[in-house]
Amino acid sequence: MLRPKQPNIEPNHNGGNPLSEEYPNGISYDGDATPTGGVDLQQELNRLEEMILSGLNIPLTRCTLVDEDKLLDQLDFIRLSLPEAFQEAAGVLQEKEEILLQAEEYGQQIVDAAQAKRAQILDESDILRQAEREAQQMRQQVQQECEAMMQETLTEIDRKRRACQQEIEEMRRAAVAEAEAIEQGADEYADSVLENIEQQLQEMLRIIRNGRQQLYPDNSKGHNSLPPKKK
């Protein structure tokens, strides 16, 4: 409870009562008994302690004489300063809560960003693994197609090789048959030519004999003549 203030009976320069008083620390308060300016409660409590310790000690007792007015004024000043201190403390707490909230939001943003980055990395890893699987499948498919094409090519080459060998064999047989036919025809032609020559020679011998017989009719019996060759 605030100690009631005694009205100051000393008039001011204008002839009226003063509008404000000053506490021992020099900080003034307005008409509703509220201190103005910043207040350090720890310092004011220390000043209150100094006022008590600096009082007059009564010998053989634990009592101390202090100035009641100054002590009560200091207590009133501290009591009036408490709401402002509480308000400052509440402001500090609110600011602390805001800072903590901002820090929490910032931390949550960092966590969200990290989780998003992790999800992105996982998605990229999944995409890379999917791409590797597809590339492996494509490599296997291409390898199988190449092996199939190679096998088909080898089969076609072997088929064509056998066909060529068969054609060559047929051509060889045809050439041999044709050569045999030509050889047989040549033999027949040669035999025919020789036979024709032989006939011509026999005809010439016959003509020669006839001519000699006509030249030497008497000696025709004495000369050996070749008998005509029978056909």
Image: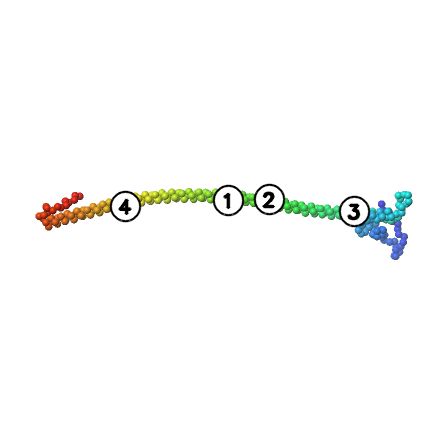
Residue drawn at x 20%, y 47% as measured from the top left? 197
| Residue at horizontal 44 percent and vertical 44 percent from the top | 150
- How far apart in space, not on screen, are marks 1 and 4 (Cα)? 62 Å
Q: Looking at the image, tell me whether mark 2 or mark 3 is earlier in sequence order.
A: 3
Residue under numbered circle 1 = 139
**What residue would you read off at disc 3?**
86
Label 2 crowd (10 A; few <14 / some 14-19 / many >=20): few
Q: Which is more toward the observer, 227 or 13?
A: 227
Nearer to me, 97 or 19: 97
The answer to which image quadrant residue 167 occupies is top left
Categorize mark 3 by other alpha carbons within 10 Å: few (<14), some (14-19), many (20+). few
Residue corresponding to mark 2: 122
Q: CA distance from mark 4 to mark 3?
A: 138 Å
Q: Tag 4's secondary structure?
A: helix
Q: Is residue 150 visible?
A: yes
Indicate which label's residue lies in the foreground, 1 or 4: 4
The percent coordinates of residue 89 (x first, y second) are: 77, 47
Indicate which disc residue 104 carries: none
